[in-house]
Image: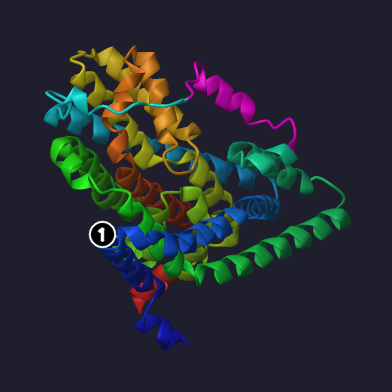
Amino acid sequence: MTTKKQKFPLYLQILIALVLGILFGIFFPDKVEYVSWLGDVFMRALKMIIVPLILTSIISGVANLGGTDNLGRLGFRTVTYYITTSIFAILTGLVLVNIFKPGVGADLGLSETVETLPVTENPLKDTLINIIPTNIFDAFVKNDMLAIIFFSLLFGFFITRINKNYSKLLVNFFNASFEAVMKLTQFIIKFTPIGIFGIIAKVVSEQDDLLELAGRLGIYMLVVLGGLFFHALITLPTIVRIFGRVNPYKLLKMMMSALLTAFSTASSSATLSLTMDCVKNKVGVSNKVASFTLPLGATVNMDGTALYEIVVALFIAQAYAVELTLSQQFIAVLSALLTSIGAAGIPMASLVMISVILAQLGLPLEGIGLIIAVDRPLDMFRTAVNVWSDSCGVVIIAKNERETLLIEKKVES
């Protein structure tokens, strides 16, 4: 069985499905309805396990941590990593958009109508308040990830504070529940190539004017993609090499199936189950670290989204010939950091967050219409970067927790 996996690993199956989906979408756009349901079913299956996975993994992970010292140390390292990499991503985007100025001379006639994007006047305040759910079952129904994570953290922590007999019973229950959810996850993962084929075929068939748009928004797209690739292939690997002391490109290969799925689905939350499977079974990170950091990362660690938001905000300012001062650009950087934390891990959620940044900078909301046509393909790239950052983070934190990883054993052999 091991030889078979080595000959035809999952990431190669996904890559082939990706190529076939692109070709099908290009040459048979009128037949896509016959295969798109494969992607719909796959996405429903992934979304089905998001809440059970987050709930059981965090409660199990926190309960197994034991005391407040372990939880506090792990939480501090996790949050520090997320904030640091997000700032690096934002600064990368800020430098590139100021150097290349993709918005100067942009065709405002290309703008599309923006329909009902809700603008939140106090995004940070609302995000912090809404972390505390008034009804946890309502949070389950609405997939309110921050509220679910908050409840799970508290529940897992207080399991360690009750009678030892009860505590042991609950720890065993949630450990068993988490293992059951992971078994279900591994079953769903087997159908990933088929699902990816259906998703990509549908996405490609809907982008019939993408080449024309790429020609007119080419510099803007290149700035976004250049920033994402720089962050993914230079910044994050450097951080992994220095603070994780492992080969980042071997890690990249091990995480390839999760990254290709993130690219295809444009949803870090939907990819969480596959990310966790790769991190635990291929990289060798313990359940204690993976179950705490990955669900949190899939919700609040959005490096690619943060980079994208700062580029879009300044692109729109340049397109409308609005000169932003250094202080205004600092506000944009801070807003991109905070709104990326509040961005849902679902396709195109960042458009809502961009409207918040535009409102704070006094820029017209209609500016989003300039980039909305090419948002989906760029969304796919930035989601892959988000998941890659989560993967790097969990390895760095595991190494700082003095864990020995499978990736190191393979390097030694």
Q: Nearer the viewer, residue 282 or 50?
A: 50
Confirm whether residue 402 shows in the render.
Answer: no
Can residue 135 be found in the magenta stretch? Answer: yes
Can residue 46 be found in the magenta stretch? Answer: no
Against 18, is 356 above or below? above
Rendering coords of residue 14 (x, y %): 37, 68
Crowding at label 1, few (<14), some or many (≥20) Cα neighbours within 10 Å?
some
Which residue is rendered at x = 34% and y = 25% of the image?
333
Name the side, left or right, on which 146 lies relative to 9: right
In terms of secondary structure, where does tag 1 sit? helix
Rendering coords of residue 386 (x, y %): 39, 46
Q: Quadrant of residue 13?
A: bottom left
Against 220, is 380 above or below? below
Q: Quadrant of residue 166?
A: bottom right
Q: Nearer the viewer, residue 16 or 215?
A: 215
How is the protein colored in the picture? rainbow
Q: Nearer the viewer, residue 171 or 350?
A: 350
Q: Quadrant of residue 222?
A: top left
Which residue is rendered at x = 50% and y = 20% of the image?
120
Q: Nearer the viewer, residue 121 or 215?
A: 215
Viewport quadrant of the C terminus: bottom left
Q: Number of numbered discs present?
A: 1
Mark 1 — residue? 26
Rendering coords of residue 174 (x, y %): 73, 58
Confirm whether residue 336 shows in the render.
Answer: yes
Name the side, left or right, on which 347 lies relative to 100: right
Q: Which residues are magenta?
A: 118-136
Residue farthest along the front direction in this orientation: 30
Name the side, left or right, on which 349 lies relative to 21: right
